[in-house]
Image: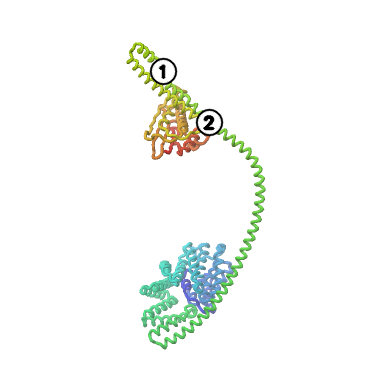
Amino acid sequence: MKTCSKIISLLLFPAVVFAQQSLPDSLRNILDNATSDSLRYKACWEITSGYYGTINRDTALYVMEQALSLARRNNKKLPEARALIYKGQLLSISGRYAESLKCLLEAFTIAEDPESEKNTWIFDDNFSPQKSRLSTLSYAHNTFTLLMFAVQNQEQQILHSKESRKIAEGINDSSRILSADISLGRTYSDLNMLDSALFFMKDAEKIALQYAKRKNVFSIVLYRLGDIYLQMGDKILARKFFYQSMQQAEESNNNIALVRNYLRLTTYYRLENEKDSALYYAIKYDETFRSLGTISATELDNGTAYENLFLAYKLNNQFDSAFKYQGLALITKDSLNKARINSLAEFQNLTFSEQLRLQDLEKERIQIQNRNRNYAMLAGLAFFLIIALVLYTNNRQKRKANGVLITTLTNLKSAQAQLIQSEKMASLGELTAGIAHEIQNPLNFVNNFSEVNKELLAEMKNELNSGNTIEAISIANNLEENEEKINHHGKRADAIVKSMLQHSQSTSAEREATDLNKLADEYLRLCYHGLRAKDRSFNATINTDFDESIGKINIVPQDIGRVLLNLYNNAFYAIVEKMKLQIGNYEPMISVSTKKINDKVEIVVSDNGKGIPQNIVDKIFQPFFTTKPAGQGTGLGLSLSYDIIKAHGGEIKVETREGEGSEFIIQIPFV
């Protein structure tokens, strides 16, 4: 409920007796004039949460029984749960713990079931059915805390208070958060865990201050804060909170909170040995206590009142009055203890019975679970037998098919190896014209110097016959120089032939220190001259930019040569295709550069040809994919290049602009 008197009831001590009273005519008129059961139910809550909920527990319990009947008659589960919770709360305060536990357990069963949201009464527009159910569940946990306080089970108090607060925070229900904070603050104070107690009570103070209508609750929070500060040894601050709480209680006519403050101030001044103040508040306690009527005998433990009067009179040396109240205190406390022992015994019996019932339910649940597990196991076994039969049949068929697949795979691998070798030989064929051109150059030198040497030998013979040894020696020196040149160009031709043989090998050689710049330049010239040999009219600008700081790098030269040759061939093909478009002022150009970047060498081959369409860029390194017409390419060149660069621990990528050109970038680490 929105009124705060319900929160007060959570903090009061349990009562001794309960006697059902008839409902006064004025209150019965309120119920009779209601036009529907939902309004009658709401009226019951307003009656019990007001005067009668605080002062007359008997009437409050009677009215809540009416609310419970209304909810059950209309099959409204959440209203039924709330009525059960409030009834359990009233029974707990009255000391009827076993009956209270029955009500709360029944309320938990309803509030924990989402089905209870389907048919309910909602009296607050801010609450959906789901939020109403969760608020009811939070209320049940907090009321269970009250019962655990009565039976002195502090572990359960904390557990249920925290659960109540967690649920309330989830739905932003400040009223339930406030109740949970007060319960936690009280429990931690009883356990002497004062930092935790102060934390939750300060949070309760902040929430209570936000609502002017919560003055009743605010007075409770204030005297609880006073208790905590008194335990912490701060007497001045404790007394300040007691007086503030007393003022709030007077303003809201909350005599129960007022009595509790009189009790605290009596004890405070008695311990401080301030006789007059202790006696003053002890008398105020007794007077206000007696004015509460039936509530005084059931909820506030008048044995405590008599004991405080006894101690206050004794402190003031008024022994006749002191002994009178001492006797009353002993009689009352003895009666209260006997009643409490009987209530606790009933509670323990019910708790034990509930445990036995839960154990029986758990045994039944385990039996059903085991039976279901056995059925599932048998069904699973049958299923697996069917699957095994199907798998066995499939396995026989697969074994037959695997024989065919293995033969096919072997043939495919053989064909793949032949295709790769064919690609290598095809690239070698493209180099043939360039190699012929490159070999022709040193051979021309060899032939020319050989002819010159023949003439020089004839001259040397003539000079020797003439006895001119000086001229003969000079001619011999020239012959020696020519022989060195013949040797140099012979080695040059030999190197070209060896490169050709290495390129045609089917397996890669081991890595060796190689001048990368020289390798890149050599294959570029071979490729260019090969193209020129096919088409004498072809011409292109070739730019090179080699980083001389690279030096030698450990690579397989013939493999890297194949990569460069593939890139050069593709670049020349791209510019030739663009030349066919006869675009005005087009100047074909290929650029090759090398650069040292940290621990890597970068090779860039770029052209200003047709470029590569963006929709096929991701496919160019796939085997057998080619952009060339049928018969002009196998689609293995870039695929092999990709594998070679990866084998060297490097990477190859392409940047292209369709219609403008492409740029292939290779990075190889130093090894």
Q: Which sits in the foreground, 215 or 325?
A: 325
Q: Is residue 611 in view? A: no
432 sits to left or right of 271: right
The type of residue carrying mark 2 is Gln
The x and y percentages for residue 446 are 42, 20
Please give the label number shown on residue 43: none
Who is closer to the viewer here, 176 or 360?
A: 360
Can I make out residue 71 in this image? yes
Q: Quadrant of the C terminus?
A: top left
Q: Which type of secondary structure does the marked residue at label 1 adopt?
A: helix
What percent of the width, then of the height, locates residue 382?
Answer: 67, 53
Q: Position of residue 593 (x, y in %)?
A: 40, 33
Which amino acid type corresponds to the residue marked 1 in the rendered image?
Answer: Ser
Mark 2 to mark 1 CA distance (whole Å): 40 Å
For the point 45% across and 68% down, the residue is 181
The residue singled out by tag 2 in the image is 421
198 with respect to 15 (left or right): left
Left or right, residue 473 beside residue 622: left
Position of residue 310 relative to residue 466, above or below, is: below
According to the picture, the residue beneath numbered tag 1 turns out to be 450
At 37% across and 73% down in the image, what residue appears?
234
Q: Is residue 175 above or below residue 278?
A: above
Q: Earlier in the sequence, mark 2 or mark 1?
A: 2
Of the pair 383 and 419, the residue shown nearer to us: 419
